[in-house]
Image (cartoon, rainbow, N blue to C red):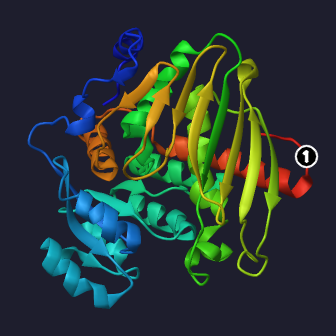
Amino acid sequence: MKYTRRKFIATLGTGSALLMLPSVPGFSKPIFSGDKKLSIALVGLGNYATNQLAPALQETSLCYLNGIVTGTPAKIDKWKQQYNIPDKNIYNYDNFDNIANNESIDVVYVVLPNSMHYEFVIRAAKAGKHVFCEKPMGLSVNECEEMIAVCKKAGVRLFVGYRLHTEPHHQVAMKFRDEGKTGIMYVQSEFGFKIGDPTQWRLRKALAGGGSMMDLGIYAIQAARYSIGEEPLSVTAQEYKTDYKKFSEVDETISWQMEFPGRHVSNSYTSYTTPANRLYISTENRWFNLFPAFNYHGNHGSTNRGELILPDINQQAVQMNTFSKCILDNLESDASGEEGLRDLKVIEAIYKSVESGNKVKV
């Protein structure tokens, strides 16, 4: 599913003003794994499940929507009719554990507020179901470690919804580092927008665990980590607020710097008030830029050699096909529970640095 290093280097070597990267099968359509398709139940029918995941599951070939778990009975009839979901595959949060007796469900996709990920990943694992979990995987390192341990004990796979791991521009960013080991590599990653409804769950610490950092900053952390290809050694972070009432419980804006092995450094930014959407990578004599960088569609890339022309994929569909293929063919994934844990280690260090005003080891 990845753009190979050899093909990428060959393309860069053309020196053309317009970089025409060839279409990659994994970007445009899934790789089939026999005739088996995994049955997925979505847990939580909010905006992302309704407008992104459910429609994407109509385009996947290795998995399909076959169940729902919701705490809102009024949603049931619409989902039943729209996606032909049988009554036996419809659950609420109280009777969810009965899914253990349902052999027609293979995977549970947890799309709940952040604070509920821990509970439902563990309940799904104990029910014997593979798990896809939205990011952030948990609210703490301890939660993530326990989630991983329970899934391993239950013999099920755990994946985190890092949709950009299979997005063409970001896969090129991951390969760009292979040619950038000479000289200091600098990465700038930033993601922010002006959040709306002040009553939404993302602004309640008990549900979200944090503010822009948990929701958007995790993308910037990811981008810096996989662009450099190393784990950060330390972070230094600063928090800013302009609306103390709206953001009384969670962070509004955070800037942070990360130091990596080999003298690589990154500078990142996330905000719930200021639009930001960029990934920039620089070496001694080469650069790579994505702007916008983190959208569902329309990301745009360029390098010092010219513009990147890459397919605009359905990120959620390719992500779920990729996870399904890993289960069906017993393949490793770079969006595993361990990857989710690594992000929470960085996030905890960032919050500690904000609180103390000092550099904090990761």
Q: Residue furthest left?
A: 35
* Horizontal relation, residue 108 to residue 277: left or right: left
Residue 242 position in % (x across, y down): 78, 70
Q: Where is the N terminus found, in terms of image quarters? A: top left
- Residue 198 lies, with reference to residue 195, above or below; the image says below
Q: Quadrant of residue 69?
A: bottom left
- Residue 289 lies, with reference to residue 84, above or below; the image says above
- Residue 21 lies, with reference to residue 316, above or below; the image says above
Residue 336 position in % (x across, y down): 46, 42
Q: Residue furthest bottom?
A: 74
Q: Decide: few, some or many residues near mark 1? Use Cα within 10 Å; few <14, some 14-19, many ≥20.
A: some
Residue 123 position in % (x across, y down): 43, 66
Q: Quadrant of residue 165?
A: top left
The answer to whether residue 14 is visible is yes
* Horizontal relation, residue 114 to residue 7: left or right: right
Residue 197 position in % (x across, y down): 56, 81
Residue shown at the point (22%, 38%) measured from the top left: 28
- Residue 312 lies, with reference to residue 12, above or below; the image says below
Q: Which residue is mark 1?
A: 358
Q: Where is the C terminus found, in terms of image quarters? A: top right
